[in-house]
Amino acid sequence: MQKQKREHLKAEFKQSLTEFVETLKNHVSTPDDQWAIKGFIDIFRNIYTISTDTKIVSKILEIHLFPKLLEFASQNNYRIVLAEQQNYYPDLSFVNADDESVKFAVDLKTTYRLPDSPDFCNGFTLGSHGEYFTNRKSYKNIQFPYSEYLGHFCLGIIYSRVNPGKSYESETYRLEELQSITSVISDFQFFVHEKWEIAGDYQGSSNTANIGSIVKISDILEGNGVFKKLGEKWFDDFWMNYGTIQITLPNGKIKKITSLKEYLVYRGKDAKFANPMARKPSRKNTRRGQK
């Protein structure tokens, strides 16, 4: 497929997805910006509250949004292919109903605002930079080979946790008390960006090969990631080679390149092209009121 056509299809899909995402807050929120989900109900009309555990919240949000995603796909002539395994990338593959060569990867990503620094969030992981990322024809841990997707998107959700310092204790309510239950999360912000647009130059977790995101909320919403001035090709090149290139320091020690500035210098490009990135405040600093 010609590059110009690929870019046109990608821009068209992104625009449609962005317009769709702007409708989701009303779907998941009450008029006072609480989450419309209050807990689990049994056949005896008992409601059991849920915790703010990120895995639980993320999965329930995914279930909550899935009917709307199916509706979006149908309206835009796509079908959704779900990841076959839990650890597969992406969460959702949008495949054009008339041309199966037109595919888009969409990962659902959720995170919470930091209570002591509400301008920042806890961040996302943006998929692996391992086998399927470096070998674009690989089927390992991916629904379709990476190169078959015309674009890789993050549908992101940022929220606030209610009483984040409170230890979780499940509470039981009767159905008649539904309106009195306080939701565990609130104040949603939705966004859509290609994942390179919100990527950082550090891993998202210490024990797995995951790409980390930026963490300042305004930068996330604007797609102002560390590769902003460089583009997707540099994002791909950096993460395909993350930690594999070694340089010799003046003192004779060997060092692996794991920062974008070092990588740009190694490639002969001015390090100023690495977009400045706000770091997440440390707990020590936030306790002192510093940002």
Image (cartoon, rainbow, N blue to C red):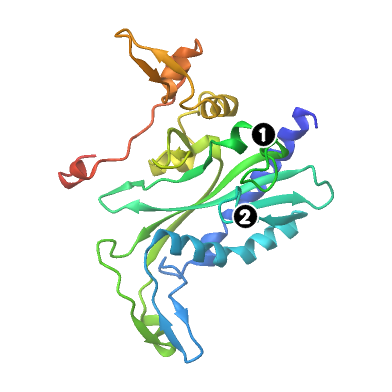
Q: Nearer the viewer, mark 1 or mark 2?
A: 1
The residue at 55%/36% (across/down) is 130
Q: Quadrant of residue 46?
A: bottom left
Residue at 52% x, 65% y: name it: 26
Give the labeled residue for mark 2: 20
- Type of amino acid at the residue the image marks with label 2: Phe
Q: Is residue 4 above or below residue 75?
A: above
Secondary structure type for disc 2: helix
- The x, y position of residue 167, in whole percent, is 26, 67
* Residue ID at (37%, 85%): 173
Residue 230 % position (x, y): 53, 23
- The span from disc 1 to disc 2 (Cα, nearest Å) is 29 Å
CB under 8 Å between discs 1 and 2: no
Q: Residues within 10 Å of mark 1 (few under 14, many from 20)?
A: some
Label 1: which residue?
136
Residue furthest to the right: 98
